[in-house]
Image: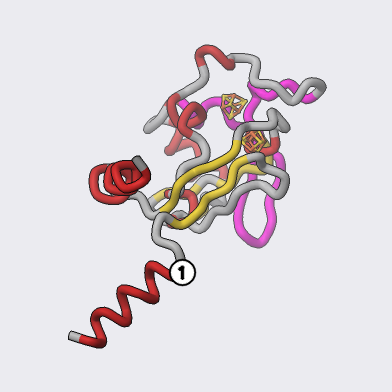
Amino acid sequence: MNKLKKFWYKYILRRKYYRTGTCRGCGACCTHIYVKHMNGVVKTQAEFEKLKLLHPFYSYLVVLGEDETGLYFECKNLDKETKKCAIHKKRPAICRRYPQEQIFMLGGTLKEDCGYSFVPIDSFSDVMKKIQNKQQK
Ligand code: SF4
Ligand code: SF4
């Protein structure tokens, strides 16, 4: 079963990590969000207004502040008291799939107390074995 799972994730889904854990419902991923697109992290409101035309998800975001990385946002559907999503059943696909390993490729990380974690599909010893096998050829 493990071999089949590994094959599925690695070669069919083309993943490098297994996602483990569950959501603790802390709401941290719905606030202090940086928005990254082709030109990097959004730094100006004008840039952000253009993005809103491309994907409806962006219209949920409001600017919270700005730092050396760029603008950071909060989703207006986040209930600040309960930390729950006000549109949970109708939340966008990007939220349903969160977190995905692509966040690492986009320069992001998991929020500090996120209940999820990512484990490499190929363990360190698997990688070492591959290197040794190549060297012996
Ligand atoms: S729509 Fe809901 S789940 Fe998605 S970012 Fe907003 S509050 Fe979070
Ligand atoms: S940061 Fe992680 S644990 Fe918290 S709401 Fe988001 S996915 Fe769930």
Please count the marks in the image.
1
Three-letter code, disc 1? Phe
Q: Residue at x 43, y 38 (%)?
A: 50
Image position of 100 with respect to 119: above or below: above
Q: Nearer the viewer, residue 108 or 68?
A: 108
Q: Is residue 26 left or right of residue 19?
A: right
Q: Residue at x 35, y 49 (%)?
A: 15
Q: Nearer the viewer, residue 33 or 17?
A: 17
Residue at numbered disc 1? 124
- Which image quadrant shows ligand 2? top right
Q: Position of residue 5 (x, y in %)?
A: 34, 42
Residue 79 in the magenta stretch? The answer is yes
Q: Quarter holding the N terminus?
A: top left
Q: Nearer the viewer, residue 105 or 136?
A: 136
Q: Residue at x 60, y 42 (%)?
A: 116
Q: Position of residue 123 (x, y in %)?
A: 44, 63
Image position of 129 with respect to 109: above or below: below
Q: Which residues are magenta?
A: 57-80
Image quadrant assignment for residue 85: top right
Residue 63 in view of the camera: no
